[in-house]
Amino acid sequence: MSLALEGIRILDMTHVQAGPTCSQLLAWLGADVIKFEPPQGDATRGQLRDVPGADSLYFTMLNCNKRSITVNMKSAEGKQVFVDLLQVCDIVMENFGPGVLERLGFGWERIHAINPRIIMGSIKGFGSSGPYAEFKAYENVAQAMGGAMSTTGVPEGPPFVTGAQIGDSGTGLHLAIGLLGALQQRHRTGLGQYVEVAMMDAVMNLCRVKFRDHQRLAHGPLEEYSVPTGALRETPRAGNDSGGGQLGNAIQCKPGGPNDYLYVVVQEAVWGALAQRIGPTLGQPQLHTDPRFATIAERRRNQHAMWALITRFAAGHTKREFMVILNELDVPCGPIMSTADLAEDVHVLGRDMILALDHPQRGTWYNVGMPIKLSASPAQVRRSPLLGEHNAEILREVLGYDTARIAALGEAGALGKTAGN
C-alpha cells in the first residue's frame, strides 16, 4: 500500500521536540525522513533516561519511522555529505538558534542555490526578525509570551502553563502544514521556498479565542465568565470556565480523587431536561422552572449557584456514572482522563492511539499513535532509530557512495563512532 507522502525525502536536522514532532508526522504519512545528527546525537536521546544505556522515551516517542545518519559538520568531508544530501532531498528542516547554520556556511540563500527545488522548514523561538529574534525560547517561555499563561489558571492565583505542549508540539504541527503547502506550490512553480514558524506565533494562533474575548471587552463585560470582567482590559484567567457561548465547568464526582471530575457543558437546549433529571434528587422538583436559570442570560448571572446544584447531584455518582446520565440527556460532557486512564481506555486502544513497539535497547514500550486517520493510506508506525543506525545504508542507497568511500569517511571522522559504522 502506497502512503500519502511516499517519494518525498526529508533531511531532518531538528532536535528536542518541536521539529521532531513535525518530521515524525510527515514520516508517518510516508515521507523518508533522514534524521541528520551530530556524532553525539540528538540531546534528548539521553534526557530523562529511564533505562540505563537506552535511548530515552523523550527521544523514542518523537522519532519513529526515521533513519539516522551521524555527520560531523565541522569537517570538510561531513559538509560535503550534507551538500550531497541537500541535492537529493525535497525538504530540509532545522530548529537551531539564530545564525547557527549561517556560521556553518549554510544559510537559506546557499541552500537554495545548491538545490532550487528544496524547501527549508525553520522553527525559531520568536522568528528571524523583530527585537526578540535573538532570544532563546523554551516550551513554557513560548506559552508565557504567546498569551496562553495569562489566560490559564484562577484569577486569584499565578498563571499556569498547560499540560499540552502547545509551544513545542503545537509549533511542529504548524510547520507541517506550512511544508505541505510549500510542496503543493512547488508542483506549480518547480521552486522551493523558506518556511518559518516561530513558537510564540504558533501559541498566539492557538490562543485565538482569547484574542476574540480581548476585543469583546471594549464593548462590555464577558457575561459567560464566572469572574467579573467589566473593569478589565485583558482576557482574564477564569479557571475551568468554557470560555465560549455555552457555560462549562469541571464537576467533582465521587469518590473525590484528584481526577474524579466530569467536564460538563450546559447548552441552552439541554438545561430543561438536565434540571428535571437532577431537581428531584436535590429536593427541588421544580428546578426546571426556577427563574434564576430560566434563560442563558440568567444562568450566566447565577452560574455559581447552578454549578453548586450540579455538584451536589454529582457527589452521588462516579464520573463514569454521571457521564452515562448526561449522555442520555444529550448533555456534552467528558470525564477528566488521567494518563493511566488513557493508557487503558478501550476507545483509545481501539483507535490505535496507544501503540506497543519493540526497541533493541529498551524492549517493549508504548507510543501515542497517529492522530490523523487516512482511509487509503493509514500510518504504519515503526520504532525510532539507534544513533547512526542507517549511516552506511543512507550513504549507499541515497547518495550512491561505494564501500571504499564510506570507509574513508569513517576513517576521516566525518561520521563519528555509531551503530551504523
Image: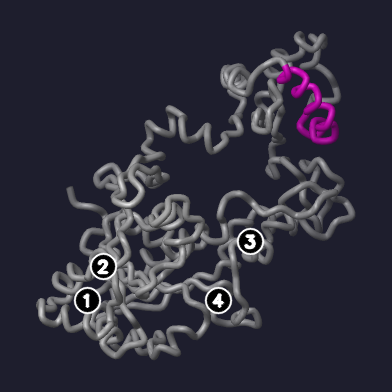
Residue marked by disc 3 = 140
Local secondary structure at mark 3 = helix
Local secondary structure at mark 1 = loop
Say what amino acid the circle numbered 1 marks: Val
Task: Name the N-terminal-most of marks 3 and 4.
Answer: 4
| Magenta segment boundaries in residue numbering | 295-315
As measured in the structure, the alpha-carbon distance from the residue carrying label 1 to the one carrying label 3 is: 36 Å
The reply to whether discs 2 and 1 touch (Cβ–Cβ < 8 Å) is yes
Q: Is 350 situated left or right of 44 in this image? A: left
For the residue pair 342 and 124, the one nearer the viewer reads as 342
What residue is shown at x 65% (from left), y 65% (from top)? 141
Say what amino acid the circle numbered 4 marks: Gly
Residue marked by disc 2 = 9
Q: Position of residue 272 (x, y in %)?
A: 71, 19
Residue 20 visible to an observer of this rendering: yes
Residue marked by disc 4 = 127
